[in-house]
Amino acid sequence: MASDISHIVKVHQKEFETYISYSSIQERTREIAARINEDYAGRSPLFIGVLNGVFMFAADLMKGIELPSEISFIKLSSYKDTSSSGNILELIGLKENLKDIDIIIIEDIIDTGETISHVVKKIQSLGPRSVEIATLLLKPEIFNKSIPLKYVGFKIPHKFVIGYGLDYNGLGRNLKDIYQIKEPLDH
């Protein structure tokens, strides 16, 4: 998945190396958009992006959506430093009426599934016609929920990543590629 030329960036004294190139992200995002266009032909889904990390993926995904659709955002948080805190804090809620609407939740990354599980339960309680999930990244080795993930960009190992909207304590979201934390060399 890494690009041909590995690039190292330093964020908060930790080193990260290029893991998924911007061109690979763009290609995969176009493929997901094409599938959604096909799957939802004749329908008008509401996309719900989970902020903050999803803003780049959501913007690029929406550029490929050819359906009449709307987008809204919610903000939740479950990370502190480089690991999930386990506590999900809802910071900004939905204002739209979701009754009998097709919903596509857009996520940047799904690891254990705690956050997306919380979001799906809340949205399903509001009576939508359907709920599907589109995520750029999935860490399958730690995903422990039975929630179906219909649109997955990349399956990645359980290592911390930044860039393309993902951050490390607030920094790194503006990086165009996705970077993986650099492991110390064993000597």
Image: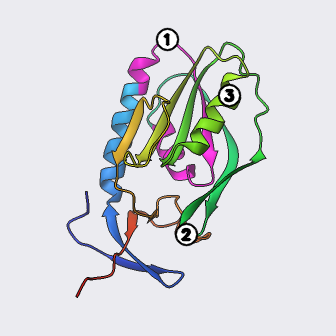
Estimate the spatial distance between the alpha carbons at disc 1 and disc 3, rounded to whole Å. Answer: 22 Å
**Crowd class of label 1 (few under 14; some 14 to 19; many from 20; radius 10 Å):** few
Q: Nearer the viewer, residue 10 or 158?
A: 158
Estimate the spatial distance between the alpha carbons at disc 1 and disc 2, rounded to whole Å. Answer: 40 Å
Residue under circle 2? 168
Q: Is residue 3 left or right of residue 9?
A: left
The amino acid beneath tag 3 is: Ile
Q: Quadrant of the C terminus?
A: bottom left
Residue at 43% x, 49% y is 142
Q: Which mark is residue 42?
A: 1
Q: Is residue 55 above or below residue 96?
A: below
Asked if the residue under mark 3 is in contact with the one under mark 1, i.e. CB atoms within 8 Å, the reply is no
Q: Quadrant of residue 127?
A: top right
**Crowd class of label 2 (few under 14; some 14 to 19; many from 20; radius 10 Å):** some
Residue at 57% x, 34% y is 105
Q: Position of residue 118 (x, y in %)?
A: 65, 38
Asked if the residue under mark 2 is in contact with the one under mark 1, i.e. CB atoms within 8 Å, the reply is no
What is the magenta range? 36-63
Residue at 52% x, 60% y is 166
Residue under circle 3? 123
The amino acid beneath tag 2 is: Tyr
Q: Is residue 11 left or right of residue 102?
A: left
